[in-house]
Amino acid sequence: MKDMNPSLLTRGQILKATLGALILGILLFVIAVLPAEYGSDPLGTGKLLGFSRLYRPNDPVSTIGGSAPQAYPPLKLEELGSGPDVPMPKEAQNPAPARQFEQRQDSITILIPAGKGLEYKMNILKYGTVKYEWITGQGILYFDFHGEVKEANPGKDVFFESYTAAYSNNMIGTFLAPFEGRHGWYFKNKGETDIVVSLRLSGQYTL
Amino acid sequence: MNYKNLFRFALALLLIVAGSAVFAHGVDEKTKAFLVGNEGAAFIPFLYIGAKHMITGYDHILFLVGVIFFLYRPKDILIYVSFFTLGHSLTLLLGVLGNISINAYLIDAIIAFSIVYKGFDNLGGFRKIVGFQPNMKAAVLIFGLFHGFGLTSKLQDFEMGQDGLLANLIGFNIGVEIGQFIALSFVLLLISASRHFESFKRFSTLTNTLLMTAGFVLIGYQLTGYFTK
């Protein structure tokens, strides 16, 4: 082993090299890395040399050895709904009722913890209509606006239909329920901080 | 005797890190159907991701540069690289299959430290300054374990479903080894070529000093990330 790596340096030289590496490392870190990666500029070098311009606060800083900062993965048609293996329940074909639920309005806030997914749903009869608006306090959520058919005997795999799935911080729309059941949003917070969603509803539904 | 202590220290460090692991990534009850991204087996793409991560992930490569710096017998290179491979494959499999998610900044800071360690080792620091030489193979194996946890966190970024997890994992792992092989070939070529020059001693001192420098910078970068994010 040892003959492979003959220690050619003296104690003093090694100390000097180590200390030099440490000092050079700290200098590089403070002069360039801190301003460019974290927007902190203790010596003013970031501004002077332009490192600060590299800093983008909303970029999720990925690990330096890793891949590029992750963009949102593309959503594909095949991901819509519960997939081809789960048949639509026959109750979806039921006729619309004569009377819809009473018109009502609600304002709701929902906390989506970092890294978690949550659902918020309304009961709507067939052809009931609802206007909706939601907005996050800060940050982007993945959401799947979808509905599940009200079934007398739900099977093991629950059928659901996706109306819209996207990444967004804000959404408005009107909704005409295609079948009686529970309709609403699945929110997934893929970030590292909790996100609050403010939801406003107006229409023919119950909660 | 002495490297026993080092081994204990490293083990303790490993346990602390593993202890702070959050068992996240559990699929929430209703959300399985909604998992976006990679559903099902995708062996070749994960093979590619693994290889790419190794070739572009310079923290792993810097460590390997340090490891093989003074090795020129193919047998020795094979032994040391095998120890590294064994280490990181173990924790990669363990981490992904056990759903262990460890703070990526912390793990990457330890990986950065492994670069500093190896640079210092190559300069002869342990014999001349510390006064004992820790077992080099053990060190490579132990740091390999940490590198594996780093790979785990990279793979978990892809939020795979349970479908085809094993195939994807094995694809990723084989990809890592392919990438490592490619990167090592280039590094070996460079180092072997430079051995023929008179200035190899100066070159080796400079290289290992720069290795340590890079390690220190990366430690700062990762720890800042850990404390601010």
Image: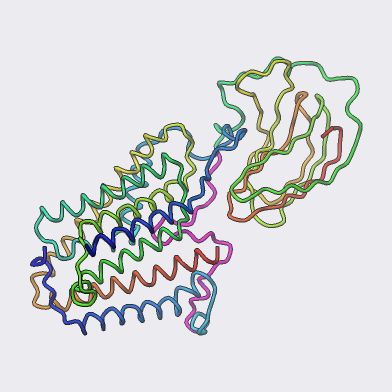
Q: Is residue B194 above or below residue B186?
A: below
Task: Tell me residue A52's x, y (percent).
Answer: 52, 75
Q: Is residue B224 above or below residue A15?
A: above
How many badges with numbers are in the image? 0
From the viewer's side, name the closer residue of A176 and A188: A188
- Residue pictured at 26% horizontal, 54% vertical: B141
* Direction from residue A3 to residue B46 in the image, left or right: right
* Rendering colour mode: rainbow
Q: Is residue A66 magenta?
A: yes
Q: Is residue A137 magenta?
A: no
- Residue pictured at 62% horizontal, 33% vertical: B30
- Residue pictured at 46% horizontal, 52% vertical: B19
| Quadrant of the image containing the C terminus of chain A | top right
From the viewer's side, name the closer residue of A35 and B146: B146
Task: Tell me residue B39's x, y (percent).
Answer: 48, 34
From the viewer's side, name the closer residue of B134 and B144: B134
* Direction from residue A79 to residue B203 in the image, left or right: left
Q: Residue furthest front?
A: B1
Tell me where residue B42 sits by quadrant. Answer: top left
| Quadrant of the image containing the N terminus of chain A | bottom left
Task: Tell me residue A12's x, y (percent).
Answer: 21, 85
**Which residues lie in the magenta part?**
A48-75
Task: Tell me residue A80's x, y (percent).
Answer: 60, 32
* Direction from residue A42 to residue B78 in the image, left or right: left
